[in-house]
């Protein structure tokens, strides 16, 4: 049971830090507007090469995988 609580905590931390990292990365990328959407390749390149965005997505994915492990171990009501 204590291992499951640790996994729940890890999932939450990954989600929080991932979201904060995504926010910092997208702030550095800049505003996405209709004019930036006219050059989608340049926009995708800017987003995909932002280290904060990449780390944020990896942390978010790690949190999701950890959450799946939690769901396989404990009832959903306990997990939440």
Image (spheres, rainbow, N blue to C red):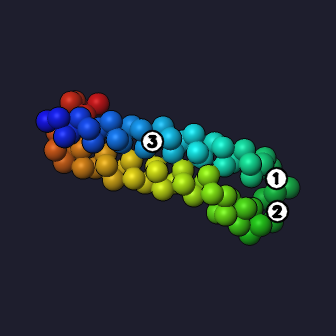
Q: Residue 38: give its label.
A: 2
Mark 2 or 3: in front is: 3
For disc 1, the marked residue is 34
Q: Secondary structure at mark 3?
A: helix
Mark 3 or 1: in front is: 3
Marks 3 and 1, the one that precedes in the sequence? 3
Residue farthest toward the right in the current orientation of the protein: 35
Q: Residue 1: give its label.
A: none
Q: Answer with left or right where residue 50 lies relative to residue 3.
A: right
**Residue found 85% across the figure and 55% down from its top:** 35
Q: Residue 15: give its label.
A: 3
Instruction: Report the quarter where the N terminus lies.
Output: top left
**Residue found 51% across the figure and 45% down from its top:** 18
Marks 3 and 1 close (CB-CB < 8 Å): no
Residue 21, percent from left and from top: 58, 45
Spatial distance from mark 3 to mark 1, Cα to Cα? 29 Å
Q: Secondary structure at mark 2?
A: loop
Spatial distance from mark 1 to mark 2, Cα to Cα? 7 Å
**Residue found 82% across the figure and 62% down from its top:** 38
Instruction: Report the quarter where the C terminus lies.
Output: top left
Q: Answer with left or right where residue 72 lies relative to residue 67.
A: left
């Amino acid at each position: 049971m204590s291992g499951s609580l640790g996994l729940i905590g890890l999932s939450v931390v990954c989600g929080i830090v991932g979201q904060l990292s995504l926010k910092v990365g997208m702030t550095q990328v800049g505003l996405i507007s209709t004019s930036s959407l006219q050059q989608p390749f340049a926009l995708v390149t800017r987003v995909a090469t932002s280290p904060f965005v990449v780390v944020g997505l990896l942390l978010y994915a790690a949190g999701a995988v950890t959450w799946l492990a939690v769901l396989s171990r404990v009832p959903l009501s306990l997990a939440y």
